[in-house]
Amino acid sequence: MASSSASALAKWAAQAARGFAAAAPSGKGRKVAVLGAAGGIGQPLSMLMKMNSQVSSLSLYDIAGTPGVAADISHVNTKAQVKGYDKDGLAEALRGCDLVIIPAGVPRKPGMTRDDLFKINAGIVRDLITAVGQHCPGAILNIISNPVNSTVPIAAEQLKKMGVYDKRKVMGVTTLDVVRAKTFYAEKNGLDVSAVDVPVVGGHAGVTILPLFSQATPKATMSAEVLDALTKRTQDGGTEVVQAKAGKGSATLSMAYAAALFADSCLRGLNGAPVVECTYVESTITDAPYFASKVKLSTEGVDKIHDLGPLSDYEKAGLKAMMPELLASIEKGVQFVKSG
Ligand SMILES: NC(=O)C1=CN([C@@H]2O[C@H](COP(=O)(O)OP(=O)(O)OC[C@H]3O[C@@H](n4cnc5c(N)ncnc54)[C@H](O)[C@@H]3O)[C@@H](O)[C@H]2O)C=CC1
Ligand SMILES: O=C([O-])CC(=O)C(=O)O
């Protein structure tokens, strides 16, 4: 997000282009698990994590298909040791993990909202988080499974129930919203996308996704119509992909890329090189108890939650408009665990 993060990410991308051989920031190699590793996101994400030089051990877990994915990825000539685990291997997959990335669960089909996934994914996330609480309670969690606005509160409540909740460690991955906002803003304004930054705040569904183009850098002058169109395109980016895939799922490749960037930032933070990223966390900067904004990631996870900064009138209206849906999604997640 911030320029230090952007340059760290650019460096990482450059390393990737050279074959991922460049040195990691100082610090020990990290154990990372991907839960849902055989899925549409899980497979490319697992490969990108295998290519990350900060990873020394990579656990790939899914309810089906992991042996093949693990065998395949393990042939990539980077240092991370890869192991695949199926149904009975979750405890071992998680033991000693520094970072657990969760893309397990069903994706949308055309006509569905992310909230329509709650029925199936809420239970999947709760059960996986229970295992995390038992086997690696200190790990940083990157939650991708939708609806993120509810699955992050579910994770927090479940860990609270188990007495191992640390609000600094539980993060919903909203990086794809930032990736999209940067791409659309750069395209529209003829800018070099690698030099562009756009914070995206709120949550991760429809109107709860609020790109702050008034804070985008470099600055570009846009008409109210163009600003509105860019905002809506960012909010509907997921639906654009769901419709284009016409029943074959939602964003997987751009999501794997975004999740790999975010995981890389979490690992950099753990290794003592703090990075600022937008992510959905327990927060007090608005009326919503969970909210995505710029967050400093450091050795214990969330180190500082930045406030929103100056908003345009358009953004102030967007912030107000998202609140009923965001608060309802959070409450739905909280109640799922409390009443379960
Ligand atoms: N946060 C974000 O920005 C985004 C989130 N998503 C969400 O990510 C999730 C996954 O999407 P895809 O990879 O496309 O779906 P997919 O169906 O291709 O893969 C999901 C994987 O999860 C596995 N799985 C199901 N139950 C499991 C369990 N109990 N334990 C471990 N693994 C389990 C399945 O076997 C499958 O391999 C969906 O909920 C989707 O909505 C998708 C794109 C962006
Ligand atoms: O739209 C979906 O269902 C998947 C998702 O969260 C995204 O692509 O942003």
Image (cartoon, rainbow, N blue to C red):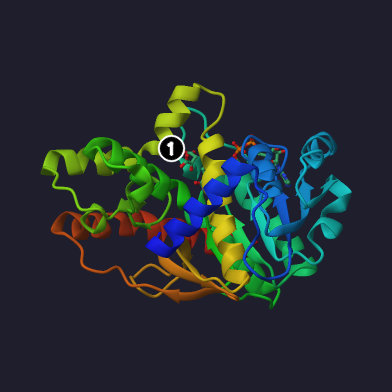
| Residue furthest out toward the left | 223
Q: What is the number of callouts on the image?
A: 1
| Residue furthest out toward the right | 88
Estimate the x, y position of residue 167 in percent, counting from the top left.
56, 74
Q: Secondary structure at mark 1?
A: helix
Residue 191, quarter of the rendered image:
top left
Estimate the x, y position of residue 309 in percent, counting from the top left.
26, 69
Left or right, residue 209 beside residue 19 = left
At horizontal 11% and vertical 42% (from top left) the residue drawn is 223
Estimate the x, y position of residue 229 in percent, counting from the top left.
22, 38
* Three-letter code for the amino acid on which mark 1 is drawn: Gly
Residue 151, quarter of the rendered image:
bottom right
Which residue, given by chain and number where applicable, does mark 1 sit on?
A: 238
At horizontal 41% and vertical 55% (from top left) the residue drawn is 203
Quick one: label 1, few (<14), some, or many (20+) residues within 10 Å?
many
Left or right, residue 25 beside residue 308 = right
Q: Is residue 278 above or below residue 84?
A: below
Closer to the camera in the image, 76 or 112: 76
Q: Can residue 239 be seen in the rendering of this structure? A: yes
Closer to the camera in the image, 139 or 267: 267
Q: Is the CB of the residue bearing disc 1 within 8 angstroms of ligand 2?
A: yes
Q: Is residue 12 above or below residue 153?
A: above
Image quarter (top left, top right, bottom left or bottom right) of the N terminus = bottom left
Estimate the x, y position of residue 84 in percent, counting from the top left.
83, 45
Q: Where in the image, quadrant-wise, is ligand 1 located?
A: top right
Q: Is residue 185 above or below residue 81?
A: above
Q: Can residue 278 be seen in the rendering of this structure? A: no
Residue 257, quarter of the rendered image:
top right
Left or right, residue 324 beside residue 22 = left
Image quarter (top left, top right, bottom left or bottom right) of the C terminus = bottom right
